[in-house]
Amino acid sequence: MTTRFQAPRGTQDVLPELQPYWQAVNDAIRVVTRLHGFRRIDTPAFEYAGVFEKGSGETTDIVEKEMYAFEDRGGEKLALTPEGTPAICRAYLEHGMASWPQPVRLYTTHHMFRYDRPQKGRYRQHTQFDCEIFGSTEAMVDAEVIALLWRLYGMLGITGISVRLGSLDDITPRREYIERLKDYYRPHLERLSEDSQRRFERNPLRLLDSKDERDLSFKENAPKLIEQLSPGAQAHHEVVLAALESTEIPVTIDPLLVRGLDYYNRTVFEIVPDADARAQGTIGGGGRYDGLMEILGGPPTPGMGFGSGIERMILEMQRCGVVFDAASAADVYIVNKAEGASAAVFALASRLRSAGIASIVGESAKSMKAQMRGANASSARFAVIIGEDELAGGNGMIKDLSGGGDQENVDLARIPLVIAGKLRG
RNA sequence: GCGGGCGUAGCGUAGUGGUUAACGCGUCUGGUUGUGGCCCAGAAGAUCGCGGGUUCGAACCCCGCCGCUCGCCCCA
């Protein structure tokens, strides 16, 4: 052994013992999306880099410093999807979904790739559940999407979380607000933290998100966007809030909620554990993006959606004490101890499986004791022992492993039927 | 990208400069002629994350790298 490989930084193997969580999440996603009339779409693992450069915004961290971008052998600039929404928008345009009945409701689960420093709940490859609704400007749609995600978390047993809701207004009034915000901060620039000085140039909205002590007093007195929304955005916001409050979803208005993507307007939201204020505590978030399709070269098409990290959902499930019983590996474990009986044993296993009975065959080279130990470890309900005596009589010994170990000799041909009956009983 | 903590068999740990690195769980094999779970016995399994340095001697001290983790930036 000279070289030992390990999984690349920020990636992880999902071992069998964790699979029940993934299974539960995927099952719940299928149910909840059906309840809301969403249909599944799958997009490629990589896209032309331009999809994200234009779609997510060239100055966003996701594109600027986290994107896995590369040239293929033909010189095309590609990128592993760092973010789902632009890719789904691209598919919407490419397949003429504007001619489908509107609005179009789509969901997917997709690997996302971002070159970032890993932490608990933050990986270089993670899996995101994405929902998008295209073609509706209605505020009710925003509330519905949030409610869908809320319902999913409920189904998964995730508790102690709440919705943070904000509004980023429409693009033009937001630009005017940003100018007012910069006017407010400009005289104090020298006294701000280094991070905030950078934010002033790159992403002024983030100034309100600072946790640095030096910035706090300025933050408090800064003009808040949510308090001076344009009339249309204000009305929209009120409808979303009222709809959510009508369904007992705990909502707090977060005037400082800023999302990392450029394309959002009006509604933005995050769902966060109450006990965990860190950024990587956020399990899901999204918002409205009425201008994104045009940025990608399509006709004006409103959109609303979210992304939610499945790895983070699972961490929350574990925090909430959600556990699964260890699944048994099979219903039947065949103890194979007859000289030259491999064909007969193989055929028996095949007939059991055809009858829908999960079966594992022991290794004939191992002793009967060892194979019985294997049967026990597999937590199979029955062992079927095929030894010299049984084979000679055309029988198999069915042993019930659940209790004291009752066993009976049964004609080989009848074994699947008998076991099916016992499993039902 | 910046700062802190950690890294010993598959897993959880003990060992903090001096003989063949210890224990529990797990794995494998046995406990007489063909039988599990409990028990008992035995075995396999670790170049002490990797590389370099200090030292007569390093798992233990120093440096670099890799990985995990916590905080920041930011995101799911």
Image (cartoon, grey):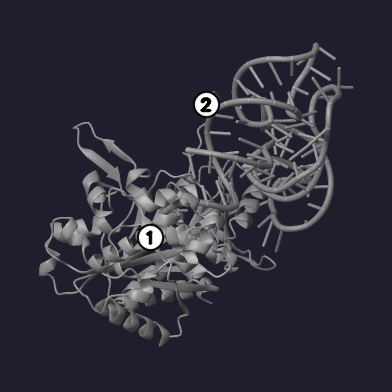
Is the residue A139 above or below the residue A336 in the image?
below
- Identify the residue shown where x is 24% and y is 65%: A171
The residue labelled by disc 1 is A205
Between residue A175 and residue A62, name the one nearer to us.
Answer: A175
- Identify the residue shown where x is 49% and y is 71%: A156
Q: Which quadrant of the rendered structure holds the N terminus of chain A?
A: top right
Is the residue A23 above or below the residue B6 in the image?
below
Please give the label number shown on residue A295. Answer: none
Between residue A329 and residue A297, name the one nearer to us.
Answer: A297
Residue A242, picture quadrant: bottom left
Q: Amino acid at mark 1?
A: Leu
The residue labelled by disc 2 is A3
Side of A422 where A101 appears, left or right? left
Question: Looking at the image, can residue A409 be seen?
Answer: no
Under circle 2, the secondary element is loop
Q: Earlier in the sequence, mark 2 or mark 1?
A: 2
Side of A38 where A260 appears, left or right? right
Question: Looking at the image, can residue A134 be seen?
Answer: yes
Under circle 1, the secondary element is helix
Mark 1 belongs to which subunit?
A
Between residue B33 and residue A144, name the one nearer to us.
Answer: A144
**Residue sitting farthest toward the bottom:** A246
Residue A56, picture quadrant: bottom left
